[in-house]
Image (tube, helix red, strand yellow):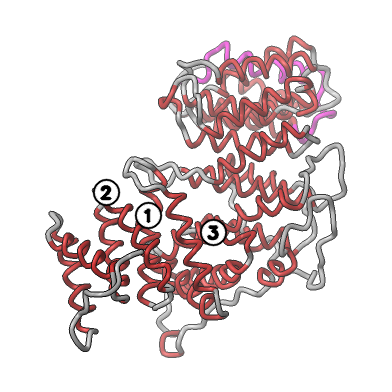
Amino acid sequence: GTGVASVTKASSAEASGPTPSTVQAKHGAVAGVAALTEVLQDKITAENQTAIRNLVPAIEKARAYRGRGGEVVRQAACRLLASVAGAPSWPFKDATAVRYLQTVDECARHTTDSIQVAAADALHVLSRSRFKAELCLKCVDNYLRGLKKADETIAARRGYCLCLGSLPVTALGERRAEVISALSQEVHGLELPGGKDQDDPATRQHAVLALGRLCLSTSLTSEELGTFVGALEAASNDYAMDRRGDVGSWVREVATEVIAALLDVQRQEPSDSRPQLADTASSTKLLALMLKQAVEKIDRLRERSFGLLRQLLCSLPSDGAGMQLAYRRVCHSEAYDALGLADDSSVESLRPEKRLAWPPAEAEALAVALRRPMRSKEAEPAEKSVMTATTKAELQQADRNEAVFNALVPFLSYEDYRSALAMGLVVSVGGLTEHTAKDGKKAMLQHINSREGAAREVCLDILKTFDAAGWRDAEPEARRLLAPILNTVGILFAQDLVPEDLAQPFFEKAQRSVRTSKEISRTRASIAVFVGLLKWPGVYRRKSLSMLLQYLGASFPTVRQATAQALYIRLLEEEGDFDLSGPEAE
């Protein structure tokens, strides 16, 4: 008790003055009180309990957050609120709960991410230990009202989403459907009150995380479940880009973690505290979304998806640990090795136990493919003596890429997963990342050559990806997908894997993709397609040659040069005259 009293007095004494040393002292004192409160609890005297309960209001009254570095004092104050609320034997008045909520709400609106997280963590403890149902509903009203304001700041909207996910779902009562709907609207990013000014990937990321924390801790009505799953599907297809790059990957990554947690729930006994999908078709659809991410171009997201798939299909249920890992990763920057979740699986004979919505299609075949060990590649003996840490890391990364693609690409044979895998694979095979494109191409060609009819299946699925991408430059999916798709088709033509009867659809798709486009990367990617179409005499040879001749007069030097080089090599392959006659198109 004496030690806590000393620290408490120090905190109060340091509550004024903006110098850096004073801020550090305030932060250390408040953090010390919070830590001691968590450990000692009942051993603290009633007098000191009162002093500690009143410490945060006293700090705020003295404006102790002012000065450089005051943000860390706010974080420590939120932790202290959580420590006090988590001491069950301490008396706690309703007025104290209301006062603490003021601090939480103020910190939730702060522009610093770590302060918002500290506020959400404090609210998580307060709402479960000290708040009455009426106060929880007041929180819901405040946060939903904030999300509906057209002039609300983006930082505040992020905090509101986090705080909604921190509330106990049992306290929402009849407002549960409204909260799920509001968070789902944030995930979709549609009909935002402030329009495009409030379009923010971090808000969508927090909304997905909040949905997962709420929806995975209770049973849902069919309407609520539909809203939840629809939001996850939208988040899995978030490919937003800005000057920071693929910011949509933040949303896709957490969506993959929530989907994995939802599917993990389906493996367990039905319960009123867990959502239940309608059938195995629903699980199969969600698993397909994970497979798509597991073969895409971003290493971080591909490895996480692959590791979560292994954990789902090659180990026992995790009993809710997945959402906790996701929350700690997103909000506290605590990384975890997804590939290690089921790395040393001792369940070689594990077979999926049948539930209402489990197992999904081809679960056993997937488990066998995912269970293969990921061995590290060995360097050549002459190279071992000069191998650096960077070289070892590169070898390990290359080995992981190869293992992921080799395990999952063969599932292009299964209709349930073919479209999703094809959509993800073309981005890797036709992308700019060399090691990813190399391993993806190798796995794709191995799959095509492994059985008869695989080439046609892959070609037909790639034709479908053209339709999904669109073709106008203004369409985000067209900008993201068309160049990689055309690159992938060019590889298939170069390997002589495109059936002749598909010449017409491939020409039409490629021509439409570049007809009005001003994207140089798309135009250059189409060169290999039109050169490949020169293989068969007839109308599409003439049309393809016409497109290539137009490229020779293009305004971009790189297009002219690439076209001339490709045509030169192609014409050298002709033993005789280049026949431009042949039957007309039907």
Give the SS element for disc 1: helix
Res. 183 mark: none
Q: Which amino acid, by three-letter code, is at mark 2?
A: Ser
Counting residues from the start of the chain, the first of labels 3 and 1 encountered is 3
Q: In terms of sequence position, does the residue under pointer 1 or pointer 2 come before the other?
A: 1
**Principal secondary structure, stretch drawn in magenta:** helix
Q: Which mark is residue 517?
A: 2
Marks 1 & 2, CB-CB < 8 Å contact:
yes
**Separation (CA) of disc 3 from disc 2:** 30 Å
Find disc 3 in the rendering and name its residue: 302
x and y percentages locating residue 437 in the rendered image: 42, 67
Q: Is residue 33 above or below residue 419?
A: above
- Which stretch is magenta? 38-66
Q: Quadrant of residue 288?
A: bottom right
Decide which of 519, 232 is in the foreground and name it. 519
* In the image: residue 557, left or right of residue 6: left
Q: Amino acid at mark 3?
A: Arg
* Residue 29 visible (yes or no): no
Secondary element at image label 3: helix
Q: Amino acid at mark 1?
A: Leu
Q: What label does residue 482 carry, if any? A: 1
Q: CA distance from mark 3 to mark 1?
A: 21 Å
Quadrant assignment, res 19: top left
When asked about the image quadrant of residue 188, the answer is top right
